[in-house]
Image (spheres, rainbow, N blue to C red):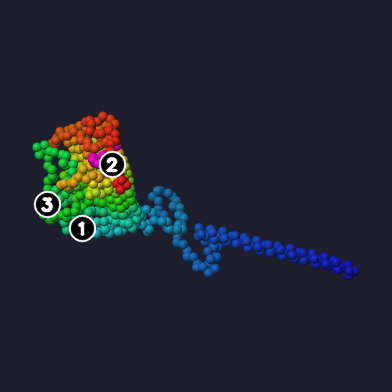
Amino acid sequence: MSSALIPMEMRSLTFMLFIAFLVLSATFETCNARRGRHWRQSRSNSASLSKKNYKGSSSHHNYHNGGSKPKPKPKPKPKAPSHKSSPLPPAPTKPVQDIPPPKKGYDSGGHSSVFNVMDFGAKGDGIVDDTKAFEAAWAAACKVEASTMMVPAGSVFLVGPISFSGPYCQANIVFQLDGTIVAPTSSKDWGKGLLWWIDFTKLRGITVQGKGIIDGRGSVWWQDYPYDDPIDDESKLIVPLNNTVQHKPPVPIRSELSGKMPSIKPTAMRFYGSFNVTVTGITIQSSPQCHLKFDNCIGVVVHDVRVSSPGDSPNTDGIHLQNSKDVLIHSSSLACGDDCVSIQTGCSNVYIHNVNCGPGHGISIGSLGRDNTKACVSNITVRDVMMHNTMNGVRIKTWQGGSGSVQGVLFSNIQVSEVQLPIVIDQFYCDKSKCKNQTSAVALSGITYEKIRGTYTVKPVHFACSDSLPCIDVTLSSIELKPQQESYHMYDPFCWQTFGLLSTPTVPPIGCLQMGKPPSNRPQSDHDAC
């Protein structure tokens, strides 16, 4: 009997050990499973916490692991009550988790970034010097992107020489000019003389706009003319009948208070070394010298601007371009005592259209190559322009001895009225009393004149090109210029060393233009080429 029980006990013990093994295995798998789920859940929670700020278990977990207890978030301010009639209150807003970046036109605190010069101490009475107030307003505007410096309407601000400069200013600042800014007329305010009055330097996206006026009060500077200022060389071509035309403008009456002004005459408004410049709406008048100058700028737009100075004011160019690219000038009226637009060396991609010019000396490329310098101008378009009572119409002027080139120029749809010299190329330009003859010259090629019509009073066409480097690829079409006898000796078209093509008959006939290419044209050296 005992031998029969032993196997039964053994079997029972084996069965109990098997059950215990199963229980332990299930417990072990459950722990592993729980640990795995807990690890995965914590990982997903931590990922979501980086994006959202949950309340509850996650913050409780951090608190009990040594972290600081989070402060309760402030309740959002309720929206302002709606003006619309509604029986229900406005819906609560969702709390903002992060502070958004400042909007354009606002500072980091959300305040409006319009900086009115009156808030910085400007008087605006035209008597008290407001220069320091303008400087302070600019210093504040300079720090805020897309800010506005406001010069309000209804006031006159006396401002001395001033520079609104970068390069550390924020981008896209607006200079809102609705009032009037006047220049000082006392010589002591100018020291030994400055090249500019209002200067914008090294800025990105600067806009000057409004309906205001920049008044240079230039007559106190012009009165010292004409004894020490250069005279436009084309005046030698204009011979009056019976001495009925004055060569020199009348001398204004000198102010007893002003004294003699410096010999250096300032430009009214200059932009230097800037990108994306816009000037629109304003009037610039009576500048001592140039009214509006762009030097070393890229991306310039000028439109709906008015320049106003007497036709006998000396060297008062309307818009002066120098070393500037990608320039658009349109829908403007330019009246001055020199070139309405002057395009100097280093300019390319210039487009001028829908401009009224007069009085003045027309629209000119140059003068270029003075003092044996190198000049490079290319891709210039002037079209849809009206000129009245100007010395020249469209002109290219270069000095002997220069180098470089002018190429790719189109003058199209130019309406002239009582213009002395509508079409001019002058490679013997000289505004001194005497200039010596030199061999080298700025090369001219690819010059097109089309649809130039109206009346002239001295000579319809004057082409005077270099002996050693003639003008080539000069094309004329649809030229209709009729004489209008006034007070000058009149002349037939003149051409010298000018080669090109008459694609249509012209009025008057321009038989002096030589067809094709010159028989021997000195090739440009690498030093001369642009």
Q: Which mark is residue 254?
A: 3
Q: Residues within 10 Å of mark 1 (few under 14, many from 20)?
A: some
Q: Position of residue 36 (x, y in %)?
A: 63, 61
Q: Is residue 108 above or below residue 319?
A: below
Q: Quadrant of the N terminus?
A: bottom right
Q: Residue furthest front?
A: 520
Q: Residue furthest top?
A: 505
Q: Position of residue 190 (x, y in %)?
A: 19, 57
In this rendering, position of residue 288 left or right of residue 18 = left
- Mark sitting earlier along the chain (2/3): 3
Residue that numbered label 2 is attached to: 522
Q: Residue furthest left?
A: 242
In this rendering, position of residue 425 left or right of residue 22 = left
Q: Is residue 352 visible?
A: no
Which residue type does callout 3 highlight? Arg
Q: Is residue 198 visible?
A: yes
Kindly state the secondary structure of the residue where label 3 is placed: loop
Q: Is residue 409 above or below residue 219?
A: above
Which residue type does callout 1 highlight? Asp
In this rendering, position of residue 524 left or right of residue 22 = left
Kindly state the secondary structure of the residue where label 2 is placed: loop
The magenta stretch is: 465-474
Q: Is residue 471 found inside the magenta-colored segment of the image? A: yes
- Mark sitting earlier along the chain (1/2): 1
Main secondary structure type of the part rendered in magenta:
loop
Which residue type does callout 2 highlight? Arg
